Amino acid sequence: MSVKPTGKKVAVAGLTFETNSFSPDLTHLDTFQRFAMVEGDELFTAGLGKDEIAGAMEVAAQMGIELVPTTTADGGCGPTVSDEAYVFLKERFVSGLAKVINEVDGVYLRLHGAMTTESCEDVEGDLIAAIREMTNPDFPIAVSCDLHAHFTAKMALGTDLIVGYQTCPHVDFLNTGKRAMRLVGLAVTGQARPKLSFRKLKMISPAEGIDTTIWPLKEVKARIHEIEKLPGVLDATIFCTQPWLDVSELGWSALVVTDANIENSPNLGQQYADEIANSLWDFQDEFLFTKVDIADAVKTINASTPDQRPFVFADGSDSTSGGSTGDSSFILAALISNPIHGQVLMSITDKPAAISCAEAGVGATVTLDLGGTRATKFFKPLKVTGTVTKITDGCYQSKYPSKLFNVGTTALLKIDEIEIVITSNPAFMLDYQLYDHMGLDVTKAKAVQAKSAGGYRAYYEPIAFACIDVNAPGPSDNRLSELPFTRPKRPLWPLDLNVAEKNYQY
């Protein structure tokens, strides 16, 4: 059934990046150029129909709203973004919207929520403020963010229309875009007057403890869905903030959007936001996460029968999808000295090593230093000898997230039963497409490494005999109190374990 156009238009723009403050050096513009920068109609297809913008397109069509594309840029995640890069990215983002702002009735922004630069620790708040300056106070600006967003007071000051992923591992990209588009659609057509209420908590947690498929976040998510169905409520979100951000307002948040036209109490949204926030605080100890030493993991794997495979062992402390550098050889060193019995698949970021392998050629035996080229405060090079078995350009299609990846010259190095994929640039390990790209079957291996802090489970857990999160050093270590935080307002749990009950809210 065709939908009658409303005559309303909504502009679409995006700028996404997740900072890890403890990753060394800076992220420059070339990372965004390599990862994804598009404009115009290409914005609608860049996510291959699986991202938030695709979800927004579906709802816009249902509501008879025309979407006007501008620009998007995605840098993935990594170290703090350089001010120089942000000047360019912000100007591109703002000017793209400025060209159409007088022709549209609202804006939808696909952001992440955890992007920082050398001099700005709240990029999303800065971007929303820049768009607000071009419009009037009532102009609808909808924003979608990652569940790990660093939600700030400045973001709330700029707009009432904020939603976030409700799943971790993240499998609701489409639905998040739908929810954001629904809010802006209701606003531009006059069907609702969205009002944001929120509560911030003085708490963070290891990323591995943030899993909405298991208790207690599964229970919190269920309650959020109940609240969303109540009269006067339009949306509800929790932001379990990316824990490796060294920023002043660091902390979890609960957000509820109500319809100011029909809510039956002026404090309805705040009541629900407080309820959700209080439940998160009450469960705080459940979000802590204990990992397994690599020696114990090897013992468990070697005690299994041959048909019990694959074991997936995660190096979350070097999580490339958490902003880490991917160049840790810590677990590799442990496995060389204490081997797993059977084929083991691993990955590591090391551009010099990948190029050396490529120059040597397939079939060559090489001796080289592997790893420790980026996060030198955490990782050291490991001298290894192995056989080069494959070389590629590092271009492949990822499923999670849905996009084309280019990790540069990539080599496959075989050391006894260990096969190591060496990439020039960090590769996300949320799915196993990198291994597929190198002709490796993860289901036949005895053990497979995923450099991911929990997010890998969406794709790996269904095919794994067992998943094991391994203790290791790195910029995305789950032992948060050992990381050099300097900026968060204290007290902050669990950096401070004696946070008084009366002080747990911002």
Image (tube, rainbow, N blue to C red):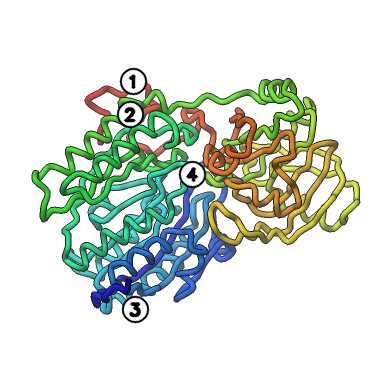
Residue sitting nearer the eye, 250 or 419: 419
Q: Which quadrant would the C terminus be assigned to in this image? A: top left
Q: Which quadrant would the N terminus be assigned to in this image? A: bottom left
Q: Compute the Cα span from label 2 to label 1.
A: 8 Å
Neighbour tally class for label 4: few under 14, some 14-19, many 20 plus, Cα within 10 Å: many
Q: Earlier in the sequence, mark 2 or mark 3?
A: 3
Residue 99 tag number:
3
Q: Mark 2 sits on what residue?
A: 491
Q: Secondary structure at mark 1?
A: loop
Q: Mark 1 sits on what residue?
A: 498
Q: Amino acid at mark 2?
A: Pro
Residue 315 screen position, x and y as percent: 61, 35
Q: Residue furthest right?
A: 364
Q: Compute the Cα span from label 4 to label 2.
A: 19 Å
Q: Secondary structure at mark 3?
A: loop
Give the vertical position of 197 relative to 280 (above or below): below
Neighbour tally class for label 1: few under 14, some 14-19, many 20 plus, Cα within 10 Å: few
Residues tagged 2 and 1 counted as in contact (Cβ below 8 A): yes
Q: Amino acid at mark 3?
A: Lys
Residues tagged 4 and 3 counted as in contact (Cβ below 8 A): no
Q: Earlier in the sequence, mark 4 or mark 2?
A: 4
Q: Earlier in the sequence, mark 1 or mark 3?
A: 3
Q: Amino acid at mark 1?
A: Asn
Q: Would residue 455 be found to the left or right of residue 434 on screen?
A: left
Give the vertical position of 365 relative to 8 (above or below): above
Q: Mark 4 sits on what residue?
A: 21
Neighbour tally class for label 3: few under 14, some 14-19, many 20 plus, Cα within 10 Å: few
What's the residue at 59%, 63% (across, down)? 34
